Amino acid sequence: MAHVPLPRNGVGWQQGERHEYEGSETVGTSLTPQFWQLFAVLLVAAMGVTFVLTAVFDALALRLLRRRVRRTPTQAPAQPTTTDHRASVRC
């Protein structure tokens, strides 16, 4: 089955017409300026969303870390039950 390329304007070709795309294995589309404009807008929007979400999650992580550090232990540290009778060897 032969590959028939599509015309650029989306309208079907008349039978017997010859075009520069005949025999081509590709559709022959190109990336238009509108595509690049939309691509740039979406790229900048995605970068903005990434930046904002990173800042929000970073602030949340810092808040949780500071909360843990600020908490004081409610119980005093346990004292050893045995007494150590050895002499100190400090110099």
Image (spheres, rainbow, N blue to C red):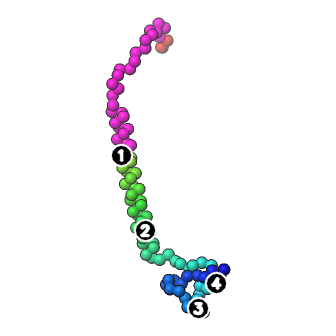
Q: Earlier in the sequence, mark 3 or mark 2?
A: 3
Three-letter residue code for mark 4:
Gly
* Cα–Cα gap, marks 4 and 1: 59 Å
User: Which SS does the magenta portion mostly show?
Assistant: loop
**Residue under circle 2?**
40
Residue 81 is inside the magenta segment: yes
Three-letter residue code for mark 1:
Ala
User: Where does the image place residue 86, in percent across and percent down from the top left?
Assistant: 49, 8
- For this orientation, the residue located farthest to the bottom is 16
Q: Which one is closest to the eye, mark 3 or mark 2?
A: 3
User: Where does the image place residue 8, in percent across and percent down from the top left?
Assistant: 51, 83
Q: Residues within 10 Å of mark 4 (few under 14, many from 20)?
A: few
Three-letter residue code for mark 2:
Ala
**Residue under circle 4?**
23
In the structure shown, which secondary structural element does the residue marked by tag 4 occupy? loop
Three-letter residue code for mark 3:
Gln
